[in-house]
Image (cartoon, rainbow, N blue to C red):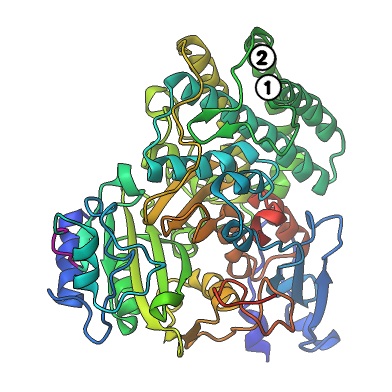
Amino acid sequence: MIAQKDSISPGSSLRAGGPAGPEADQHCPNETFVLNLGPQHPAAHGVLRVLMTMDGEWIKRAEPVIGYIHRMHEKMGENRTWAKFLPNTSRIDYLSAMHYTHAFVGAVERAAKIEVPPRAEYIRVITSELNRISSHMVWWGALLLDLGGFTPILYAFDDREKILDLLEGLCGARLTYCYYRFGGLYNDVDDTFLNGTREFVQHMQPRLKMYRDLVTDNIILRKRLTAIGGISAELCRKYGATGPVIRGSGVAYDVRRAEPYSVYSRFEFKIPVYPESDSMARYLVRMDEMEQSLRIIGQALDQLPEGPVMGKVPRVLKLPPGDTCYAVEAARGRFMVRIVSDGKEVPYRVKLRTPSFSNLSLYEEASKGMILPDALAMMGSLDLVIPDIDR
Amino acid sequence: MNPSLEQLTEQFTGLVGANGPAGTPIVAGLAEAGPGSATAATPVGAAVAAPAAATGALAPAAPPPLSPVQTVNHALKGYDFDATVAPDQVAAAAGILDASGFSLDTVTGVDWIAQDQMEVVYDYFHPTAPLRAVVRTRIPRANPELPTILHVFPGANWHERETHDFFGIRFLGHPNLKPFLLPEDADFHPLRKDYQP
């Protein structure tokens, strides 16, 4: 029994004392209890439930229990036409809706061989990167809220509001955009959007610097995240973790580079990578990524070509039989749509491969032996969106 | 070192043999719909008894001979490599891709009710090389069973559980095939084509 205890290592070298030693054993000899976190809990984002077998303050096993907001999007895909399924895609990960719509229209365009005008692809890149920043701002505010810092989320939502206003002006929706259409876009951008986006880039650059000075370099934040919540690159590979999680483990995997889609190959941007593999590395990846997104938006605005925003699309869309995949780099990682058509107007099968599902699946292995508050900080650094896991 | 498509083709041809997986007759359907033959493939809705006759009737130009292991144009299909293996070879296939540094993307099913088969599709991506691989297999619909691959990729645990939820496909050796996304007392499989709510 004591050997079992020894197998638990403290999640952090910063914690004094470490796990229960021989003296502690005399007080509570090998006693574990189950802590039910969620599905309604302020520290678990959304309706995630985690059954934690605890040894005092240390986690022996943390088993995520999911499905509380499962809506069976994949079945819905099989009983409506391709176009009617389009609004569903923005409701899977509601913080990253542009990317998800992009993957679905991309898959259909690839299968039906629909040409998309260059102007539409550039606007897709601009809006996708704006969406990435707004998504990361929610993550940033929520993570700091978890860690006990209330003020940053007010700043984050101030910045995010500017993006939501810009995108609302384009397509009417603030969150669940259905702006991309097969073959192009719902409508063209106007000067209000273009000037507003330029202003936003100007506004955001000093804001990111301020966040770095005030929050990222804050000693309390560093102590909560540095050298805690290690996820090795091998663990990421075995579980299929992507996005900032794998980039925080030193692997420069980004779908925008690995499988270039849209017009991403025409822009210069860096893929932020931190080899430390801890919660802080994942934090820094996202903070740097926002700067790169601003860079991409600036280049896309400068190069934005004139022309139509809608290609030629058949009125009744029937895809040739066969399967087609399309992957995008969403805010949380690799999102892939696999569509199977049997030549009819209605999809035969729509598979949605979501990043949060794979990113959470390694939680049980990664959280072993961690202290509870550190495990919650690590959960925050994974940036989970529960409807994205449950679909 | 990153793998090349030639290496993968060689290793998979060694695995499945030149004539394709033994024991599982490949019925004309989507598994064979390669880049060139995508438009010539048989519509799946029609029940196909004799694949050769059916494809011949539909396509005036005979489709190229179909290989169980083929490289695919990524710009057309979204993946680079496509292999059809026998159900008992999925773990060996996962082993080959694991040794080449691939990562598991997802596992899912497709219900080919007209052919009385279930297709199980394994998607892989490579974290450092621009390569996407697809491994597929077909199992009889009446007895949808095949081995698990979670000893190779522990991440397959959740994907296989989800596939069991939606299709009722049993992964032999999986420790926990209880309902996952569905309610805990669910005894139905909603993505089966004959599912009635």
How many other residues sit within 10 Å of disc 1, few (<14), some (14-19) or many (≥20)?
many
Residue B41 % position (x, y): 28, 59
Circle 1 chain: A
Numbered disc 2: what chain? A
Q: Nearer the viewer, residue A144 or A315?
A: A315
Towards the viewer: B117 or A36: B117
- Residue A288, compared with residue A107, is above or below; it is above
* Above or below for A109 versus A72: above
Which picture quadrant has residue A148? top right
Residue A56 falls in which quadrant of the image? bottom right
**Region in magenta:** B63-67
Q: Amino acid at mark 2?
A: Phe
Dominant secondary structure (helix, strand or loop) of the stretch shown in magenta: loop
Which x, y percent locates residue A59? 72, 72
**Distance from Cα at disc 1 to Cα at disc 2:** 7 Å
Judged from this view, the residue extending furthest toward the front is B57
